[in-house]
Structures are given as C-alpha cells and as structure tokens.
Image (tube, rainbow, N blue to C red):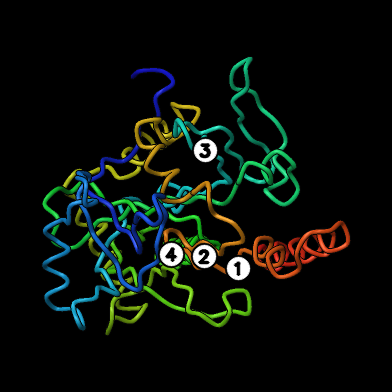
Amino acid sequence: MIKGLAITPPVLGRITIGKVVEKNGKRLPEKDDAFTITTQVQNRDGWLLHPLHQKLSETANHGKIRSIPVKLLFNSSDLNLRAEYSLFDRTTGRPVCVGDGESAKRVTREGIVGCVCPGPEGCEFGAKAGCKPYGRLNVQIEGQDEELASFIFRTTGFNSIRTLSARLQYFQAASQGNSRYLPLQLKLRAKSTTQSHRAPVYYVDLCLRDGVSLSEAVTQAISEAQSVAEAGVDIKALERVAKQGLGNGAFEDSEEEGVAIAEEFFPETEVGAVNEGNEVVKVTAVKSRLTARLGGGSANQERVTQEEEVAREEVAA
C-alpha cells in the first residue's frame, strides 16, 4: 500500500442536489430541489447523468427525484459518513486544514503539522479562509451492478451532516450493528428559517423505505447478516481494511478531486450564504447592499461593518 495515499471506498458516481453554473463569467454553485445522480465524467455542459438517474426519474413525480432507495456499504457509521471541518485552497484544490473540533492537520511551509481545532467560529485562520463542515456519505443505490462500490454524496450543510450523523448512529444501534442490511432511502427534505428569508433550504435525510417498519427492517437485516456470514463473507474484516485505507493518508480528498470540490462547495465568491451541500441559498450580500444604500463616509462605513457582523452571526447560528 502506498504510504500517504488515502484509500477511499470505490465510487461509481455522484449524488448531488445542485450544480455549478456560469453567471457573469463566474462559475457558482446553484441549489436544486431534486437529486441528480451522475457518473464521474463531465464535459463542457457538466457532469454526465448515470443510467440510474434516468431509471429513477421515470417513476418520480414530475421527473424530480426526491428519494433514492439505498443500502449502506458498512455497518460502521463513521465509515459510511466522514465529516470534518475542512478548508481547501481554491486555486489548487489541495486540502489546507482538516479538523474535528479538537485537533486538526494543517499544511504549512514546514509540512503537515498538528494543531488545535476550535471549529470555524473560534479559529481566526479558518474564519478568514472559509473553513466549514464538510461531509462525505457513501451509499449503494438499488440496481447498481457492483457490490463493493458506491455512490458518494458530498455536503457542507449543517442540516444534512447533523441529520445523517444522527440517523446512522440510531440505525446502527437499533439493528444490533447490522445497519448495512437495512432497506433505506435518501430523502430530500425542506425547511425554512429567518436566515433563509423564509425560502426553502433543502437537506438530505436517511430513513427507512416507505411502508417498512423499524421492527420489520431490523428482522430483515439480522436475517440477511446471518446468511452473508454463513456464506463466508467477513464484513468485520472488510471494515478493518476500509478504516486502515482511509487512515493511510493525511487527507481523504486528492488534489485531483479537490479543484471540483472547492468550486462546488467552497466558492470564493460566497458571501453570507447558508450552504446545504450544493444547495446554496444566498441570504444577502450585506456589505455591498448597505454601502450602496448609505454611501461612503466613516460613520456609514462603521454601520455597514456592524450590520455585516450581525448578519454573519445570524447565518452561522
């Protein structure tokens, strides 16, 4: 195994709830109210759709995919969803700093060093450079043709990360550690807040498939886990290898992927935005709006700065 290279779960394609579009000569993330399932190939028009997207959209209401039948790749919640505070170099796509709220790894001129991680709000370096929560969820979509591969959903949304983390831990506990066999679905949900100006903010939930109770799902999962074990498949060994592979590198995301990730989830032009993965809801470009309204002058500029800070606190809440 090559040292320093994170070995991540094999990926067949991407699950997104938005896309990057060109506006006024800039490429910016744009929210959507439906799932899109793509391959790992893109052309000048964007990412190419995966055949499973067409299959699911044919049975979806108005062609909009708002739920995807899935199963998990692992029983371990931490392997299925990896979430940290992350900061990317927007030019090179390289990870710069990744932390868990206690400790972090940061790239410096002297190399990668360990440091304290107080989170974006308490870190001067992270606040200036645009550090935010960043999660990656690997799931298997019903109908895919490879058993040990997956589709990846990336998000920088608090709502999605918090909800997915809770669901994964609950399912792992309730199924006696057999969440890999539960019949699940990714479901798109909406909520509105004062910070989003009452506009819907979309996030992703993980729940049981429609019509299946928890007791039925757990019974099915335990039975399937026993059958798989009797067939000689060692899931615990699979998880050990997966954990070892993810820990083999300092950062999970490669520079090759980083450019697209930074463009989609860490846009340089993002000011005062509530970001749910790639469902970006522009709250208000407070500073530019107030400056235009109030004009120049030190007193007015001070008022602009104060109202900007209030808006940033509301967005971060």
Question: Mark 3 sits on what residue?
Answer: 88
Which residue is located at x 41 percent, y 57 percent?
29
Between 236 and 113, which is closer to the camera in this rendering? 113
- Picture residue at 18% right of the left edge, 77% below the top: 63
Question: Quadrant location of the N terminus?
Answer: top left
Residue 240 lies, with reference to residue 69, above or below; the image says: above
- The amino acid pointed to by label 3 is Phe
Kindly identify the amino acid type of the residue bearing the numbered disc 4. Glu
- What residue is shown with label 2? 166
Q: Residue at x 57, y 62 (%)?
A: 273
Query: Of marks 4 and 2, which one's residue comes earlier in the chain?
Result: 2
Instruction: Pick the residue in front: 170 or 66.
Output: 66
Residues under labels 3 and 4: Cα distance?
19 Å
Q: Which of marks 3 and 2 is in front?
A: 3
Ranked by sequence position, the earlier of labels 1 and 2 is 2
User: Crowdedness of circle 4 by 10 Å Cα count: few (<14), some, many (20+)?
Assistant: many
C-alpha gap between disc 3 and disc 2? 26 Å
Q: Where is residue 94 in the image (x, y as percent from the top left)?
A: 47, 31
Q: In the image, residue 30 lies at what x, y percent?
A: 39, 62
On residue 284, which mark appears?
1
